[in-house]
Amino acid sequence: MIPRYAREQMVSIWEPANKFRIWFLIEAHACDAMAEIGVIPKEAAQSIWENGDEPYTAMRIARIDEIEAETRHDVIAFTTELAEQVGDAARFVHQGMTSSDVLDTCLSVQLTQAADLLLEDLDALLAALKTQTEAHRETLTIGRSHGIHAEPTTFGLKLAGHWAEFARNKARLLAARDEIATCAISGAVGTFGNIDPRVEAHVAEKLGLRPEPVSTQVIPRDRHAAFFATLGIIASSIERLAVEIRHLQRTEVREVEEYFAPGQKGSSAMPHKRNPILTENLTGLARLVRGAALPAMENVALWHERDISHSSVERMIGPDATITLDFALARLTGVVAKMLVYPETMKRNLNKLGGLHNSQRILLALTQAGVSREDAYRLVQRNAMKVWEGLEAGESISFPEQLKQDPEVAAKLTPEAIEASFDDGYHIKRVGKIIDRVFAGEE
């Protein structure tokens, strides 16, 4: 990923220094296990730790790259450089192992490290959403379906829905982390023909992983597909909230706005502009993260016990998807925490249609008064359309007054009954209970 959309801690997981460090730990822990069961001398395992357990500096990495340029094999380049550090004991490194044992186990470690950071990101976002939800649990606003005014809700309830979605995403990511956290040290074609399964168990324990039940030389890629699909779902949730904010920031709506910092510029040509650039950016970043899900699924179908068609894909989607999602979650958290909310604008927008958002209440009042649903719908719609037509003509028509003037409606409902159906508080009387229910299961 380019630095513009990357944060240092997540980037460091995918840096060569961290990768080679994990490779060393895999090899060294494997040697410890082999020494314990008598396959290699204990002093050899000790020598590997004493002489090889050094930071992977730029110089060491450059040497590995130099060797790989000749060998065309990354793991051999790594073990060759390690041998230069360790000396004679290095002949026991990689005993009975194959490259995928190192590569796949390392990828599991990196993905679990990435998942841990993403879980922290989700916790921060959930906290910001909860704060805003509580602040606006009673902030009245119009709910929209198809982009058109429907019935009143509260801005807090809108945000509570997003909180619940990201809470589900956290549960999904925890499950995906658990699924990806497996270790394979089973040798060529995964038969343990040249290495004892106890070595795999030892390495897995040391690295916080579980042994892969059947590795076939590679860890099955359905695990990785589930992981990247989960990242894609989280990205989609980011986009859903970003799109909501973008729509609410439109000039004609302007109920919510991204924080606009002093000195910030919105347009190179139009000095008045305050554009939703952060949430637009999040929409784009979400597309990139989702783009990793399909190739991860296509990686599942490898030839026989293994091929390397997955390798080039994972070298890119591993860093790109996790780094991008980490950045996007942090950016969204900032947007939510600093979001500007305009309750008075919400009220004005709510009342723009002369009370039409109470049409269902009138419909139900008429049915309760003995009118068939079909006739009640006809009467309410007839009067609602007159309000719409008045708006189109530039006239402000009150929906309750229009209803009072309709003889068929007036024959069934008194003016007081009509007015009683235009209490906006009626619509949100249970919103508090919904929000409480959302947070009830929070740990």
Image: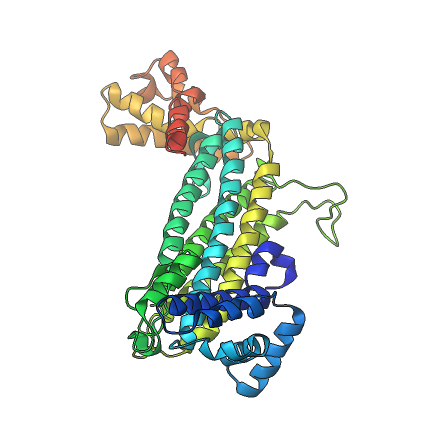
Q: Is 258 placed left or right of 226 in the picture?
A: right
Quadrant of the drawing holding the N terminus? bottom right
Within the image, what quadrant is residue 409 found in? top left
Query: Is 218 positioned to the left or the right of 120 in the image?
Result: left
Q: Is residue 244 left or right of residue 100?
A: right
User: On the image, which quarter does residue 8 sit in?
Assistant: bottom right
Residue under the point 35% across and 57% down: 179
Camera-side residue of 170 and 435: 170
Q: Is residue 422 visible?
A: no
Could you tell me residue 23's position as x and y percent? 49, 68
Say above or below: 72 vs 298. below
Colour scheme employed for the rendering of this structure:
rainbow
> In the drawing, does residue 178 fall left or right of residue 45?
left
Q: Position of residue 407 (x, y in %)?
A: 34, 20
Report the quarter where the C terminus lies: top left
**Number of numbered tags placed on the structure image:** 0
In terms of image quadrants, where is residue 373?
top left
Depth check: 260 or 311 in front?
311
The image shows residue 169 at horizontal and vertical percentages of: 41, 47
Residue shown at the point (41%, 29%) measured from the top left: 435
Q: Is residue 421 above or below residue 161?
A: above
Where residue 141 sits in the image (x, y, percent)? 49, 30
Q: Is residue 71 visible?
A: yes
Give the residue at x 34% y 70%. Answer: 300
Which residue is depicted at the point 60% across and 42% down?
A: 334
Examine the rendered structure and indicate whether residue 306 appears above or below residue 122: below
Depth check: give the residue in front, 206 or 155.
Answer: 206
